[in-house]
Amino acid sequence: MTAATILHVDLDAFFAAVEQRDRPELRGKPVIVGGDPGARGVVSAASYEARRFGVHSAMPLRTAAALCPEGIFLPVNGSKYRAASRAVMEILGRYTPRVEQVSIDEAFLDVAGSEALFGPPPTIAALIKAAVRLEVGLTASVGVASTKLVAKIASDLRKPDGLVVVAAGDEAAFLAPLPIARLWGVGAQTRAALAEYGVETIGDLAATEPQLLVRRLGKHGATLVERARGVDPSSVTGDAEAKSVSHEHTFDVDTSDIDEIERTLLALAEGVAARLRAGGVRAATVVVKVRDSAFRTVTRQRTLAEPTDMAEPIWHVALELARPEIRGRRIRLVGVGAHGLGEPAQLGLFAPDDDRRRRAVEATDAVRRRFGERAVTRARLLGSDFSAGGRDPMQPPDPRRVGRQRPVPEADEDPSNS
Ligand SMILES: [Mg+2]
């Protein structure tokens, strides 16, 4: 059994906490970051006081306003949060070079080799929490364990301001009483499938015969059982690997055509996703860049609820981020990027229900490699929105719908949501 040297550090209610730090009059109040309560957007982060009203990130702002009429609604101040994030990551880098940032407010560290200088891992975790509080004015929750999977579950368990240490050898006992939803890659469908076998806790899953789940869920059934037993072979990657992938497009003529811009974002998202899959990695964060005819450039980013290498979730987030920036402007350039890259095994599991779609996507990638990018083009890129369903593709698009379809909120600017 390896030693418990992996730390997962996760800032608490990050965006809302930064606002409360900078404006003492907001402390103890329900702060909701995301925009005006009447706006169409979603909640990016909610303070713990707001969460008591049932407000959570990715919820429509209007719903949040209905649940929490006294909520204090604030716009997203990206540059302020990025500065706080950089300050925290700088602190983490003092304790080990092996820091793997997975989102704006979250990182894994492997402190093996740092013990002679700073003490055992739980001590390092306490030092980090103290430094983040003192120097950045924020609280972080930290999980310490022998694997990334267990460290991440541990950091989430006692939020806010938590410190949970799982000794080597105790992983399975620590996980056993927790509901299976705490495991990465267990979505609603998997949960329903597992319920057929009476599996509700991670301990139930660990005790299940792997072959039984392989028959029901495919090969990932066996991986799930491994995870439930606390087995996670992935390591902290540090800085050595590629950190981002991005594609940009400059329009021939500056445009304010929303549909054209949205189709371009889809093409860019597809290009980014194809490169992620080619590299065998998933991205945690989507970045959008918009430059208008006056050369004013805006970049906005958001961390996904779950890392992905698929075009659709990347596109949906890109649309959400780009829409407020393109409205009423003539646009010269748009770009879509992905960062926070990690191997699928490190960042999550394939949902078994994804399997068929994934195989189709991989086949598409193979065709692309063989015949070039233009060989495979989605209906939407040809101007026919088959995927929206119902509309005759031979008819021109309904202008009332163009640019107004709202994507399902798949993203969560505050990835902890806790
Ligand atoms: Mg967080």
Image (cartoon, helix red, strand yellow):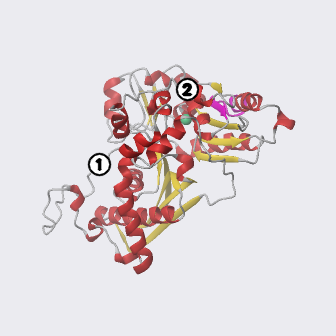
- Identified by mark 1, the residue type is Arg
Q: Please say whether residue 125 is visible from this viewpoint.
A: yes
Helix, strand or loop for disc 1: loop
Cβ(mark 1) to ligand 1 < 8 Å?
no
Q: Nearer the viewer, residue 91 or 70?
A: 91
Question: Residue beneath label 2, please?
Answer: 157
**Where does the image place residue 247, in percent across and percent down from the top left?**
48, 67
Mark seen at residue 406: 1
Measured Cα–Cα span from mark 2 to mark 1: 33 Å
Residue 143, magenta (yes or no): yes
Residue at image location 42% in from the left, 72% down from the top: 366
- Residues shaded magenta: 132-145
Kindly give the residue lying farthest to the right in the view shown: 116
Q: Position of residue 414 (x, y in %)?
A: 50, 38
Return the mark for residue 91: none
Say above or below: 159 vs 297: above
Q: Give residue 388's quadrant in the image.
A: bottom left
In the rendered structure, which amino acid carries the disc numbered 2?
Leu
